[in-house]
Image (tube, helix red, strand yellow):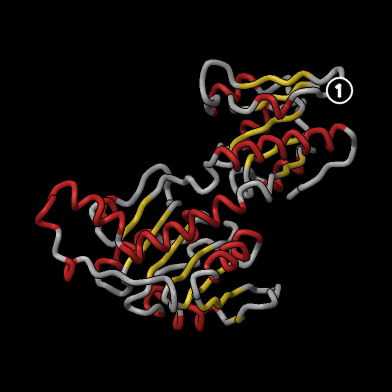
Amino acid sequence: MRILVNTNYFRETFADFPAGVEVEFAQGKPFYGVREMEERIAPYGILVIPSLFPVSNSLLDRASNLKLICNLGAGFNNVDLAYARSKGILVCNTPDAVTQSTAELALNLMLTILRRTSEIDRRIRCEKETLWQYDKLTARCLAGRTLGIVGMGKIGRRVAELASVFGTRIVYHNPRTEVPGYERLEFNELLRVSDLVSLHVPLNQASFHLMGRAQFDRMKSDAVLINVSRGPVVDERALVEALQRKAIAGAALDVFENEPKVAEELYSMHNVVLTPHIGGNTFESLYAMMYDAAQNARAFIAGNPVHVVN
């Protein structure tokens, strides 16, 4: 069997596969693009890809020997799961590898937006000594705030644990599962009471544009939105309008509706913090994703596939 790993880092995690298994990595570049992948895919039985790599049905049609796609990351909305299954292709992910790094980024974004550190850093470089007017730089603490977590999976729960250390009140919304130790609220009630709303849901039909104009209007006018889940969970145009009319006080975003494009208005807003989808982009998480993907491939070859999402 041939395995194509469409990345070029931490190769050692794919060492020591059984005899007869050939592992190949992207050559001469960080990863192969869609068109190049379509030209290369036919001989491979296992494909390992970043979770942002778009797997088209056309690519699946060309993958005559493909039996397993392993996404590096927790997400898997880049693959048509039903179509892959109809072609006899399983899809798996690495759900644990990005938990800590993504939760840490969520906390980082909360502190950055509340303490205005990103804004103040930009301004001091231009305004220099004239910025030393403390009455114009007053910010807010995380302690004493109410954090509303939408989606209490592994990342949401880790965010709750980390934020609790700051003396933050934690409320959450989960459609089905109850998480002991925290206050569970209906979605609209969470929006009403929260000072920060942090999104940690997978992207699917139910979560697409979960946050739109009606939801922003239910939030406090001094509340902020944190999104480290998937961009289309937020109606980006509705968010821009909510910020412009001061329906909410700010937003800190690691993901966007049409990546890598970002709504132009967000770039110039001082009350918005932007990062380019880096939730899982730490050395620790990247290594863990590659290691877990290799373990997924080994389990599949042994006839015991794990972390299958379709």
Side (left or right) of 173 relative to 267: right
Residue 257, can we see it? yes
Q: So how many labels did they put on this image?
A: 1
Count residues near mark 1 (Cα–Cα under 10 Å), then give few for <14, some for 14-19, many for 20+.
few
Q: Position of residue 142 (x, y in %)?
A: 42, 71
Q: Where residue 49 sits in the image (x, y, percent)? A: 62, 34
Classify residue 150 by image quadrant: bottom right
Residue 118 % position (x, y): 30, 54
* 4 on left or right of 118: right
Say what secondary structure mark 1 lies in. loop
Three-letter amino acid code of the residue under disc 1: Pro
* Quadrant into which the N terminus falls: top right
Q: Residue at x 60, y 67 (%)?
A: 161
Q: Is residue 76 visible to the viewer in this orientation of the structure?
A: no
Q: Residue furthest left?
A: 130
Q: Is residue 66 above or below residue 85?
A: above
Q: Which is nearer the eye, 75 or 145? A: 145
Q: Is residue 21 left or right of residue 33?
A: right
Quarter of the figure with residue 301: top right
Q: Is residue 101 left or right of residue 211?
A: right
Which is more toward the observer, 42 or 223? 223
- Residue that carries the numbered disc 1 in the rendered image: 18
Q: Relative to residue 176, is residue 13 depicted above or below?
A: above
Q: Answer with the quarter of the image where residue 285 lies.
A: top right
Which residue is drawn at the image coordinates 65% and 40% (left, top)?
A: 289
Residue 212 position in % (x across, y down): 42, 68
> Residue drawn 26% across and 56% down?
119
Q: Who's the residue at 76% across and 38% down the image?
A: 89
